[in-house]
Image: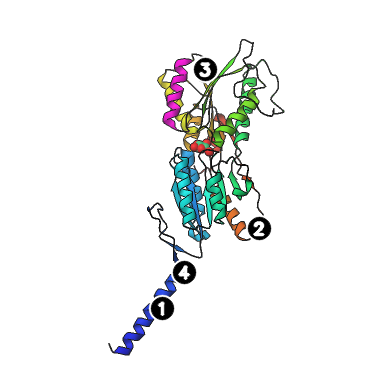
Amino acid sequence: MNRSFKIILWVFFMGLIVLASCSLMPLKNLQNGEAENTDVIDSDLIIVGFSQLGSESDWRTANTKSIQNALVEKNGFSLIFQNGRQSQENQIKDVRSFIFQEVDYILIAPVTETGWDTVLTEAKEAGIPVIIVDRMIDTEDESLYVANVGTDKYEEGINAGRWLEKYLLQQDLDDTSSQVTESIPEETELQAENGQNTDTINIVVLEGTLNSTAQIGRSQGFADIAVNHADWNILAHEDGDFTKAKGKEIMAQYLQRYDDIDVLVSQNDDMTFGAIEAIHEAGLTCGVDGKITIISFDAVSEAFDMMEDGLINVDIECNPLQGPLIAEIIGRLENGEEIEKISYVDGKVFEAENAEIDRIGRSY
Ligand code: AHR
């Protein structure tokens, strides 16, 4: 190889390197190596940091997949995913790492509602728009987030209460109200007043993670229907943390404490699965032909199996397929379009009788 040919080759390779570094931009390295998948990012992609709150339930897995499948390269995104493992402290660290990496958008599925103002102010000062997903945050400053994409958890609680009042009327068990609730009172305590009639309906509630939007909304919605029924006696409501293990543990305690439970309201399917095990281990029955009527939330695939088996009476859907809507909202923000501050994906009410048909075409 002569000298001038070597020089041409060298210039050619240097050119290639310069070209590559124009389209591939390294993200800032983290001192503690927290980021999982962010070494080199195509600068044409929209970089999104997503702090998911955990992996506590089947629902959460479906929600994560929906977002990961929507925010992919072929749609113009590069997603940095972090699992907060049920800890707000972890989530705050993750958000700070996204700010440090100068991502384009931050998504947060917040484990609980309060305590976000400081880190969201940091994101705002860095000029990074934040979208709150699935649940909501409690803040006085709405400018700390650009949008909230999720489901209406209060409406889900209302749907559970309305289903129970219709069911009891059909069974001729509710003497104190001949009609279903039409108006909803402003704010109600979860504990309904004890009725004087003999057919008291004894209810226990398995609540999700305390101070999470799903727990607050579903509890309040159900309470706002329960208050119209003096014979609904809410015996107890305790934190089952949205997990199967905790649901089983708390239900076993309820069954030891109370010998006449008529209805279980379980604020997610995973806790319901645990509760059903506890009910069976106590030698009792549940569901359509059983002693304890079960109202569950989420409507994941295994819950449909259980409805088909008659073990769960009704499931109030909380739709986890939020990824496509999030992608659409980011696209619109990129185009400078106006967006709604709150966008909900719809949910239905699925009853055991129709479960076999209703589940057709569902992906989770
Ligand atoms: O916020 C949605 C709730 O969180 C789902 O009902 C539950 O399964 C999840 O853990």
Query: Start and end of the magenta stretch?
Result: 240-257
x and y percent of residue 163 in the render? 62, 27
Q: Nearer the viewer, residue 35 or 135?
A: 35
Q: Disc 1 versus disc 2: distance between alpha carbons?
A: 39 Å
Disc 4 is placed on an element classified as: helix
x and y percent of residue 196 in the render? 64, 11
Q: Relative to 308, does residue 122 appear above or below in the rendering?
A: below
Name the N-terminal-most of marks 1 and 2. 1
The residue that disc 4 covers is: 23
Q: Amino acid at mark 2?
A: Glu
Q: Disc 3 versus disc 2: distance between alpha carbons?
A: 52 Å
Q: Is residue 102 left or right of residue 224?
A: left
Please identify the residue farthest to the right as the structure is shown. 183
Name the N-terminal-most of marks 2 and 4. 4
Nearest to viewer (mark 3 / mark 2): 2
The residue that disc 2 covers is: 337
Residue 15: mark in rendering: 1
Name the N-terminal-most of marks 3 and 2. 3
